[in-house]
Amino acid sequence: MIILLQVLPVALRAMVPVTLCAVGEITGERAGVVNIGLEGIMTLSAFAAAIGSWATGNPWIGALCGMGAGAIVGLLHGFISVYLRGDQIISGVGINLLGMGAVGFGTWALWGAKSPMLDKKFWIPEVPGLGISPFVLMTPLLVVLTWWLLHRTALGLRIRAVGENPVAADVVGVPVEGVRLLAVVFGGALGGLAGAFLSLDWLHTVSPTLPAGRGFIALANVVFSKLNPFLALLGGFLFGYFDALAIQLASVAGFGGGIPYQFVRMIPYIATLAVVALAIGRARFPKALGQPYRRE
Amino acid sequence: MKRVAETLTVLVLGILVGALVMALWGRDPWSSYASLLSGALGNTRALMSTLSRSLGLVLTGLTFAVGVRAGLFNIGAQGQMLLGAVVALSCGLLRLPPGLHLVAALALSGLAGMAWALPVAALKLTRGVNEVISTIMLNWVAHWLVLYLVIQKLSDPILGQRTFTVPPGMRFPVIRGELTWALVLALATALFFWWFLWHHAKGYEIRAAGLNPRAATAAGISVKKAMTTALLLGGVAAAWAGAIQVLGRFPYAITSDLANLGNLGFDGIAVALIGRNHPLGILAGAFFFGTLATGAAKMGLRGIPIDMIYIVQGVIVVFMAAPEALRLVRLRRPAAKAKEVAR
């Protein structure tokens, strides 16, 4: 039983990527654009953040680089989805493949290693006195901020309007394309921050499969949250908890009893399937989700 | 014809971006591509190797394509492929006469692929779980399950870095070089998918469900059944993609890092996309990516990581998402536009 409590500090860390990505994705989906390239965004931005930290010696500049990289990929996906009226799902898959290839190639070209460990001086330091990651504190703040943006500002109203009924929004003068693009870039930036967290704060390495499915677990979290940022925080903690449980059981000898390591590693994925299958009631998604807007 | 030209343009763009990346890294892209081509197609031996590598891509490409035809985004080929490979390998533990042994291995492997596709259908149709999420989760579960079996249960007692090899009676006979009669399995499966989708009532139902689920329902077609059929058929094809890596390719085993199975499942997505989800296009697409992969392995010997081809592949998929991107760069022909309006 004790292990279920010992997992908590790790669970708070594991909560970060699944929550940040989900909250970013909620913003994009509210505007009508699905992005299943979160996995690729995290992979690329984890790498960008590591380069930033390594090149400047300042991990916070690294985190900004990660965020910037996420925003740029968001811009690419938004441009394809909104202006070129492309297939959003296919674009997302392409981003995931691109992330895998670019990081595998890039780490080799730059450091001559497939999954290099980052030296401690490039890590984001813990909050002094508290002994926890600054990202763990930042995540709930960003959740509140996103909720406030979506539900208490004029821009948020516009974001929801272009996802629900772009024709009506267009008629009253909302720039549908611009608002959608902005929402997707915002989502990309949050995904980028999550990627920076992975490499600079949590896992301290960069590899083509660094997020290990967490981008897709974040998509499951979006479904679980019914597009509500606060529920996404709860979901993030729930999914993060299973993630942390697997990590803890796998890394600490004796905890798992006789269960083979590989079975322990399955926990987060099976738990995600179970939670999504059991989530009560269906999420109601914006009406124009996934559909490009064509002006008559 | 227009679509073929579009696809070819995208392929060229992907290759150009790859060249740019290599140039930025300070390598000569053209000599690298030349060595890629000669490594993949330069002589009979290389060509056989490329063909052999393309077969798995044909099968996982079919998996994704039949899903799209039913209106699904099935990206579960990777997990089904891994499972199909390990089940085929495990059949090596049975004692059966040669030939029959191969058939039994393929049958059980196909069943395993179906079994792994079943929860995707069940979760989607009863609980509304999106197949993108369920397939990725199942891919990861399969990854760890197969890793467990390969490392803990099936590994070679002497050579730790791979499993035991399958007995000769269970292997596909060699045609020439690396190419085995697995060729016939891949081609026959592609032919079957074509016949099934365009010349069988159930296949027609799949396409109708994918094109317009409401119209299909109104016409008395069960969209649920059509989706389930597409997922199960896709599961068999993906499992066979894994099986032929074990039964029809050196080292007739699975390496402990699963490297000889690679990313076949995900590669199939790009294959199907550039093949426009048609079996004939998929054959061409598989040969294209098979050439890239075989050649890249040769480039790898010259110090250029294989990941290079994933950049090319990713760029190609991103461009395939946005056909209008190509129209931006082309001058609009008034005649073509008028025809569009008239339609």
Image (cartoon, rainbow, N blue to C red):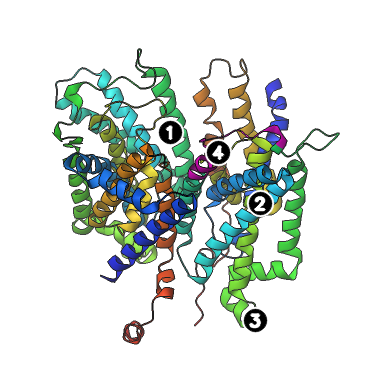
Q: Are marks 2 and 3 in contact (CB under 8 Å)?
A: no
Residue type of the residue flagged with mark 1: Ala
Instruction: State how far apart marks 1 and 2 are (Cα).
Output: 34 Å
Query: Disc 3 on helix, strand or loop?
Result: loop
Q: Residues within 10 Å of mark 4 (few under 14, many from 20)?
A: few
Left/right placement of residue B166 relative to residue A209 reads left
Q: Mark 2 against mark 3, which lies toward the viewer?
A: 2
Of mark 4 and mark 3, the one earlier in the sequence is 4
> Measured from the top left, where is residue B284 in percent x and y?
25, 54
- Chain under disc 2: A
Query: Disc 2 on helix, strand or loop?
Result: helix
Q: In the rendered structure, does residue A117 fall within the stretch colored magenta?
A: yes
> Measured from the top left, where is residue A5 in percent x and y?
72, 26
**Is there any visible trace of residue A1 in the rendered image?**
no
Q: Mark 1 against mark 2, which lies toward the viewer?
A: 2
Query: Disc 4 on helix, strand or loop?
Result: helix
Q: Which region shows up in magenta?
A: A104-121
Q: Name the residue at 50% across, 25% down.
A: A262
Left/right placement of residue B319 relative to residue A188 reads left
- Chain under disc 3: A
> Measured from the top left, where is residue B175 in percent x and y?
13, 36
Residues flagged by tags 3 and 1 on a common chain: no
- Chain under disc 1: B
- Chain under disc 4: A
Residue marked by disc 1 = B142
Instruction: State how far apart marks 4 and 2 are (Cα).
Output: 18 Å
Residue marked by disc 3 = A173
Q: Mark 4 against mark 1, which lies toward the viewer?
A: 4
Residues flagged by tags 4 and 3 on a common chain: yes
Query: Disc 1 on helix, strand or loop?
Result: helix
Residue marked by disc 4 = A111
